[in-house]
Image (cartoon, rainbow, N blue to C red):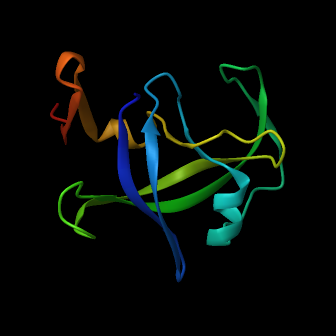
Amino acid sequence: MAPSLKVRLSWGRSHLETRMVIDTGSTFSAVPSEVAEVLGLEKGDRTQERAAVGGPVPARASRVHLHVLSPDLEGKVLLSFPLDPILVTEKGRDTPVALLGRRPFFEHYDLILRERRHQFVLQEARD
C-alpha cells in the first residue's frame, strides 16, 4: 500500500477530509475534479497536459490549504500548509485519488520511508 496522509483540504468556508497518497515522483499535488467541486476551487483558465503513469492528463491549476491530521487523535491538525499550485484533473480523466507531490510541500518537509515497517516519518527540512 502506498504511503498516505490523512488530511483536511480547505478553501474559503468549505473543507473536506480525505487521504492523499504521497507521490514522490510527481512535481505537483493533484486532486480529482469532484474534490474541486466540493470545495468550490477556482481553476485557472488554461488546461495543461501533465505527465502521469497512464499517459498525459489534462489539468488546471488552483490552490487549496492543506491541513495534515493526526492518524491517532481525531481532528488534531499536525501542520498546515498552502498548496499553490495544486492541479485539478479534468472530469473523465481524473486521478483516482488525491496526490501529494513534491512542490511546494517537500520543499519544507523531509520524508523518511521505512518500507519494511510500513511506516514513514515527516520532519521539517533542515538546510
Horizontal side of residue 57 vs 78, given as left or right? right
On screen, residue 122 versus residue 22, left or right, reads left
Horizontal arrangement in the rendering, residue 1 relative to residue 88 (left or right):
left
Q: State the image coordinates of residue 124 (x, y, percent, origin top left).
A: 18, 42
User: Image quarter for residue 126?
Assistant: top left
Q: Position of residue 108 (x, y in %)?
A: 29, 41
Quadrant of the drawing holding the N terminus? top left
- Which residue lies at the image location 82% right of the left edge and 49% below the top edge? 91
Q: Residue at x 76, y 20 (%)?
A: 55
Image height of 111 relative to 35, above or below: above
Residue found at the far bottom of this picture: 13
- Up the image or down, 122 lies above or below 68; here it is above
Residue pushed farthest top?
A: 116
Asked if residue 119 lies left or right of residue 41, the reply is left
Q: Quadrant of the C terminus?
A: top left
Out of 96 and 80, give the one closest to the viewer: 96
Q: Position of residue 109 (x, y in %)?
A: 26, 39
Q: Residue at x 43, y 33 (%)?
A: 102
Above or below, 121 relative to 90: above
Q: Position of residue 9 (x, y in %)?
A: 48, 63
Q: How many marks?
A: 0
92 over 126 or under it: above or below: below
**Residue at the (68%, 72%) spot, across then down:** 40
